[in-house]
Every structure is written in C-alpha cells, then in structure tokens.
Amino acid sequence: MQDQLIIDTPPSTARTISVTVRCLLLLAFLCIAGSMNSMAQTSENLQVPPPLKLSDTSSPRASFEGFLRNTDAAIALWRARAPIHEQALYLRAAALSLDFDATPYGGSLTSQIRRVLLLREILARTRLPDPASIPDSAQVAATGLTSWTVPGTKLRMRLIETGPDAGEFRFDGATIENLGLYYRRVKDLPRLDGGMDAFQEYMDRIDRLGVTEEELATRLHGIRTFSPQATLDSFLFNINAAYRIAGATEAALQADPPRMTPEEALREQARAEDYLDRAAAAFDVSQVPIIQRDDARVEAALQLKEILDRMLLPPLEAVPDAAEVAELDPTQPYRWRLPGTRFEIERMQTGPNAGNYLFDAETVRLLPASYAALKDMPYREQSAADLLSEFRSPQLSPGFFENYISTPGNLVPSTNILGRLVDKLPNWTNMVISGQTIWQWAALAVTTLVAAVLCWLFFWGAGRAHDMVPSPLGDWVSIVPPLLSASVAQEAMRFIDADVNFTGQEQATLAMSVGVLVLALYVWAVWRLSKAIGSTILLAPTRSRQSIDASLIRIVSGIIAVVVAVGVLAVGLADLGVDVVPLLAGLGVGGLAVALAIRPTLENLIGGLILFSDKPVRVGDYCTFGGMSGTIEDVGVRSTQIRGIDRTLISVPNAKFVDMEIINWARCDKMLIQATIGLRYETSDDQLRYVLAKIREMAHAHPKIDNGTVRVRFAAYGGSSLDIGVRIYALTRDWNEFHAIREDVFLRIKEIVEHSGTGFAFPSQTLYVAQDTGLDESLTAKAETEVDNWRAHNALPFPRMTRERMDTLDGTLDYPPKGSSFWAQAKAKSEETEEPLSKTAETGTKSR
C-alpha cells in the first residue's frame, strides 16, 4: 500500500500539505500520549487470551466478537508501546478469525498484520449488527449453518469443514484477498467511533514489524502476479508510477532554473526505470530471442498501456482474483482475456515463472500491430469510469511510448548528454523515417563507422605484432583482435540500444545482425585459441615437433577447436532465437552423409588416434611390418611415414598400418642370435659332444651374451648334416652392436668346429675325385680323450652344464677379441689409476 503514495503536486500545494500533515501528526501525538496514560490504567482490565486457546471461533458470533475485541486490544497495546509479547497474544488471537491458508502471502506475518488492520478499519466504518443477531454455536448446531456475511457488506465467514481447523468460522480467502479494494472504497469515510485510522498509522510508523510484500517486490524488482487481477493491477500501478516520476523529473530539469540537481535526477530516473521494469515483468517473452527480451518487455508494456489508455478498464472485481483461481486445477491451463481484445493473461505451467499469471507470448506478438492500428485514436476521458474500475492507478500516461522511442536515453532524456545535444538539433532531425528519427539514423551511421575503424586497427596492429614476435607468442597475440572487435560491437550495440534508443523491428534487426557478427568473432577467437594452445605445447623443450605426440596434439587441438566452436555457435544461435534442435538434427543427417563419403579419411584419422593410444611404435623406432622394415619418421592425420632400409620413404595409411603385424625392434630389451649349424655326418659322437660343449662354454663365457638364455642343442639330422641349433640373446639394444656381437659369436663357433677336427657340411652333393685324407686322427684322439676325461670325472655336460661350471666360465673369454682395437682400448683403460670420490664398495656385477 505504501507505493500508492507516489503523487505529483505543485510546490504551493506541497507546502500546504506539509503544514496540514504536521498539525495532524501533532494531534496524533497528543492523542497517543493521552491514550498511553489511559492504557496504562486500563491494560490491567484487558482479558488476556489463554496462550493455548487464543480465541473462540466455533460460531460467527464468537469469531466476530473475538476479532473486534482482540484487534482493539492489540492496537491499544501497540499505541501504548507495550511489550511485544503482550501485543502478540492479542494479534494472534485476532488473526485466528481470518482463514489465511488460501490467501497469497497468507503465511507472512506482515501480511497478516496488514490484513487484520484493514479488516478492522473497514468494520470501523460499517454499521455493525446487533451481537444477538449474529448466529451463535446453538444456532449453528440447529441449522447446520456453513457461512455468514456481515450485513450490508461482502465480508463473509465460512465454516472450515476439513483439516486441523475443521468446525471453525473464519473470514474466507475471497474476503481477505479483497480487503485492500474494500478499504480503498471506504478509507475517506470517517470511523463511526471517531478514532484514528490504525492501518494508516501503522503503515506510517517507521517501527512497524517488517516490510510489506509490496515493498519487498519493489526493492527486489518483482511484481505481484499471483492472479490475473494482481497482474493487471500491478502492471497499471507500476507503469503509471514510472510515467509520473519520469515526467516530473524531466520537467524539473527543464525548468529555469532547474528544480533538481543532476544527481537527484539520476536517482529519480533509476526509480522510474525500476517501476517500468516491474511493469514489463508482467509479460511472457519466452518466445522472443534472448538478446531482444529486455527491449521486447519494455516496448510491450508501453504499447499495452497506450492501448489501455484508449479503452475503458474493466471493473477490478470482474478480473479473477487469487481466491477464484485458487479453486482451479493447477495442472490445467488457464487464461483470462481482457474484454474487447485478444490480449490474454495466462497461468505459466513451466519455466521460472511457473504458477505466475503473465500476459502470454501471443499478446507480446500482437501488441506492435495492435498499437499501430489504435495509435491515432484519442485517449479516453478521465471520468468516473476510472474511479468505478477501482484499480489502484487507473490514470492515463499520454504519449509515453512515442516519447520513449523518439528521445535518447531511457525515460528522462535530459539526464543523458546525448539528450541535451539532441535538444539543440533542428526540428527536421526529429522526422521519423522507417520507425526511427533522422538523428537516430545518423547516430547509427557514425557509431558503425567508428566501430569499423577500431576493429580494423585491432586486426592491423595484431598482424604487425604477429610478424614481429616469435611463435607461439604471435599465435596468442592473434586471439586479441576478434575478442576486442566483439567487445566493440557489443558496446556499439549497447550505445545504439540504450542511448540512441533504437526500438521496434529496426532494433531487433540490428541486434540480430550484431549478434551474428559477435558470434562469428567468438568462434574465430576459439579457433585461434586452440591453435595457440597446440603450438605452445609443441614448442615444449621435451617434445619433438615430429613425434607421434606432436601429430596427435595437432589432431586433437583441431578436433577440440571444432567441437568448442560448434558449442559456442549453438549457444549463440539459441540466444539469437534460432531453434538449434532442427539445425542439429539436420547437421546429424548431413554429418552422416559426409561421414560415409569420407569414410576412408575418418578411418585413417581413427587409426592415428589408435597409434597414439596404443603406442606400438614411436617416431624414430625401427620396425618390421608387412614384410618390410624401416624407421618411423612421422605419424600424420592420414598416413604414417617410414624410411626404408633402402632409404626410400614408405607411406602407409593409418587404418592399414594399425591392422598390420608390427615388430618394433626398438622395444626389445635384448636381441636374439639364432642359427643352425650343420656338421658333417662323419663327425663322431664325442666330436659332436665336444662341439656342443665348447659352444656352450663360449656362450656362457661371452660378456655380451645373456647366461640365462643360452640354448645350444643337437637339434636334428639334416639332409646332409648333423644340425646344432643355437639360440642365445645378445645384451644390447643397438642394431650395429648386435651385428658385431653376432659376428664374433659365429667366428668363435667356426674356430670350435675346426678345432674339434670335424667340419661344416655342404648342402650340395660333391663328387670327390682326389684322394680323401680323411679326418685328422690326432685331433680326433685329443677330443675323444677330453670327453673320456669328463666322463671319468662325472663332468660330462649333458643334458646340460652344471651351475658351478657355468659360474666358472662366466665372462672368462676376452671380448672384444684379443688383438682388436677395442680390446687394446679396454686394456689401456683398465691399467689407468682410479681415484674414486666414494669408498662405497662396487657390486662387481657385470654390465649386461
């Protein structure tokens, strides 16, 4: 109720009112002071209600009399500034006569206090019935009475039939909801008891308990929308308040001399804008693009007010209130149409406004055309019809919309420097062309030119900086121009919208165009950002630009850039009002067709990702694949590049390369030496044993052969030879060293075979014409003697050599071979005098 005090008065009238108010306040103070003394004397005579049964509400008489008695006692104690706990007992007892359960904000203590006082003031101006004529408990029991109305009023009590309060008579929800309306009808009438208006006194007191819901809504920029009546009433009240404040502020600034400072004008303009925003909150703009919703709300509010100012308002009682809509099924849609129009107030079923009553989206769509069709019609005459409608604020706001769309700034043009400048322009600049004035079109052209020049300077400067600084700093610099350009475009649009005040379809088209431009700039910035991040990672000192990780980083950064760009694009298009669901569905179908068309490319891309995740090879690894061998040089988006042994470059598609059997030689911990040695069939058993034993001794003695993997066995009878299978592992991971070790092993095997007196078998048939000297008898005897000696001493190394023998032989051969340059270097190094820095004992283990 407090916001109904917003009025416009001339200074002389204001002074008169001020003097009158002071006199009334002085009189009230004297009355209160007198009442305090009398209250102190009579408070002891008040019948304090029991704390557990505050009031009897078993019949209309008991409930009605209890309400009057307890309310008057609470008011008397409040005026006497009695302790709160004493006031609270009577206040709670009075509130029990009202059914707040079906009332908006019924659970609010401040709402209950206000409504108790409103009801008491209405009754104070009404000729009350004789208490004996009010039905008591006996009459209720005898007649089955369920409701009673105060004679001559619409104040009705109903019997509560269910719930914890069943059997009690209370003023019903419809009565409580309309108390404000009833009070406005009778507030100018004197109280029949000659007393002061307790409700107005309470509202004027700064120490009242809490703030009203109306004040909370005002401070929190909200609006009462719990019924069609509340929505329409609040809409008219708030928009008229905005009109009055804005008009008074503009008039004060235009006066000579000004009656208001610029700072005061800005504060008043902020108040007017708050009221206008609350009026605009009565519209459902969910079907309007997000970037246009604020402007659409305000313009819809102003256009609807212009239409309502040209027609008679419906009586307030004809608009459904909260009590009426409370009886409806909340799950069913509900609409109320403004008489004579197609404008409807709808109960929102979903979204953040669910349960609130707003002018629906169809109304918002119809308003521009409806206003255009009615704007040449005259405003209605201020007459008794407005008073009969009984809205809180039925006044007119002539020219509000036209003034809003043709002046700079929002509501008070003179608070804006552009407004003061426009006042000095010739009158012809106010000519309207295509919905906007000439000066507004000129401001748009100048703003566009300045914004374009700034954007060009950003890109030009960033291009120069990119060429001057090294990568990846240049890539990071390249992100700045699109971001700055997007900010410039948004600020330019804000200036055109808020200061130049473009409105209507022209503003919507301009906002859409700027939104598309800003969205494109953000997508561009995202793409450049992904490139900058990728280049920064690739330039890390621990990563080669040719490694498989580098290739994957390029791939993944590109994919992420596309995904993020599509996400930004989808969100931006949704803000612009584009339904992205069909678009995404179309992209899905189109993407499927494109995927089928570029299936091989996608397979190769996925193959590259698999190569990264499984890492069967790395760049620089030597491998064998598909019967070919080579060194991996690069793993790209589509193919893997391999340098063959013949120095040719082999390109294998990733999808095919992943499916191959790949032997990665770079991953082996030791390298296999495997061979089959064929001896002549003339070789005796002991000669064969000799060769086997000596090869095994050589393998165990070799410092570059893994002792635990030595396997030298008589393997097979070949077509022309006795076959000895040799499988040993060289302790190296270097390819060249492996070949050197294998060569040394094969040379030592050749010496063993020759010293055993036998020889290598030839896989071909040979016809000997010369006389065959046969085998060397002395060497044969020597080998056989040594084998006999092993047998005599139980040292025959079959089926395998003993561990003691292997340990004895371990590393006893010279390697590198004696006489080689490596052997000489190793000997010279061993003769050097060592001066260790630590006395820690060496483990003595042999390097493998």
Image (cartoon, rainbow, N blue to C red):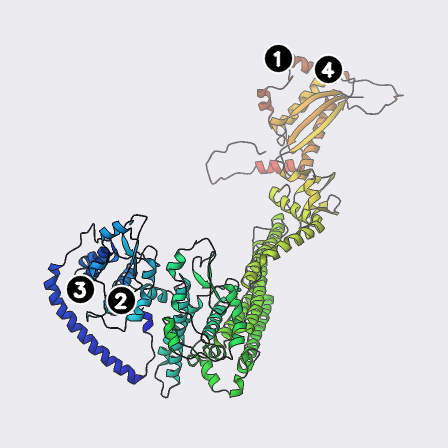
Closer to viewer: mark 3 or mark 1:
3
Give the distance between the C-alpha atoms of the residues marked 4 and 3, in whole angstroms.
133 Å
Q: Tell me the crowding category of disc 2: few under 14, some 14 to 19, or many 20 or more residues within 10 angstroms, Cα based.
A: many
Q: Tell me the crowding category of disc 3: few under 14, some 14 to 19, or many 20 or more residues within 10 angstroms, Cα based.
A: many
Q: Secondary structure at mark 1?
A: loop
Res. 817 in view: no
Q: Residue at x 14, y 56 (%)?
A: 47
Location of residue 664 (image quadrant):
top right
Which is more N-terminal, label 3 or label 4?
3
Residue 635 at x, y = what percent? Answer: 66, 48
Closer to viewer: mark 2 or mark 3:
2
Which is more N-terminal, label 3 or label 2?
3
Q: Is residue 399 above or below residue 37?
A: below
The quadrant of the rendering that contains the C terminus is top right
Q: Residue at x 45, y 83 (%)?
A: 420
Q: Secondary structure at mark 3?
A: helix
Mark 1 — residue? 794
Mark 2 — residue? 122
Between 458 and 435, the one nearer to me in the picture: 435
Mark 3 — residue? 76
Disc 4 to disc 1: CB gap under 8 Å? no
Q: Is residue 201 above or below residue 794?
A: below
